[in-house]
Amino acid sequence: MKKAPWHESQGWIPWLILLTIFLLMAVGIKEGWFAYIDFKSHKDEIDGITKILSSLVLLVGGILAYLRFFKGRTLRPKLNILPSSGFITLENDNLHWIDVKIENCGSVSIWNHEIIIYATFHTPEPYCMQVKDYMPEITEVKNREHLIDVGETSHEHAFVKVPANVSAITYQILIKDHKGTIWVQCITVSNRESKD
């Protein structure tokens, strides 16, 4: 990912801007650009320009302070991914279900998120597969944009058949938003019934 120019400059751009302004003022004084200005008769205009420049400096300083000290974190998405799983014993294998609770605890909405789940089967020779069987959407919400607003929660539900010889499964859950931000959470569950 290409970084913005101010990240690569290591802080040189503000100093170069100040140096340019200083050199322009020095050339202006040397060439006599300011000699023709009657400061007394333009006192109100100079006062107005000074106030506008002061406001701009405060605004730019506030933005730079925000970027420097908060690094933009207050306007970034933040998710908590809380997976849970269980299974139903079938004749030759187990039908596992994965419920993924997605909490938006950031300060911006998450639009059109995508969920990807990988299952790693723990056998003498472990192997991995992508989970494809998700709970189908009901007709009323199909083809709509998905939104998890600030403070809201969404749920995703998937199924996977696991052979009986697998001792445990690790699910790796990836949530990706429309801007490409990715969150990852893992959970490992047994493929054997507890003997309680």
Image (cartoon, rainbow, N blue to C red):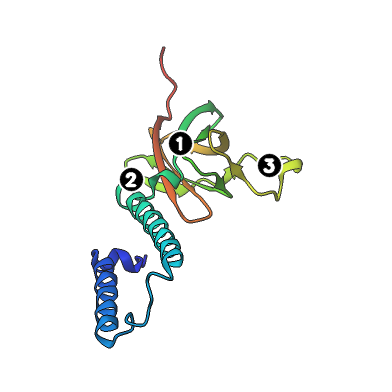
Q: Say which residue label 3 marks.
A: 137
Q: Secondary structure at mark 3?
A: loop
Q: Secondary structure at mark 1?
A: strand
Percent from the top left, x then y, of residue 105? 47, 35
Q: Earlier in the sequence, mark 3 or mark 2?
A: 2
Residue 188 occupies which quadrant of the picture? top left
Q: Say which residue label 2 marks.
A: 125
Percent from the top left, x then y, of residue 123? 35, 39
Residue that protrudes farthest toward the bottom in the picture: 31
Looking at the rendered structure, the kind of residue marked 2 is Glu
**Residue at the spot x=33%, y=80% of the render?**
34
Q: Which mark is residue 81?
A: 1
Inter-mark Cα distance, 3 to 2: 35 Å
Percent from the top left, x then y, of residue 33? 33, 83
Q: Earlier in the sequence, mark 2 or mark 1?
A: 1
Q: Secondary structure at mark 2?
A: loop
Looking at the rendered structure, the kind of residue marked 1 is Ile
Looking at this view, is 122 or 49 the one in front?
A: 49
Inter-mark Cα distance, 1 to 3: 20 Å
Query: Going by the image, does 155 lie left or right of 4?
Result: right
Residue 150 higher or lower than 8, as above or below:
above
**Residue at the spot x=27%, y=69% of the render?**
18
Looking at this view, is 91 or 144 the one in front?
A: 144
Mark 1 or 3: the one toward you: 1
Q: Earlier in the sequence, mark 1 or mark 3?
A: 1
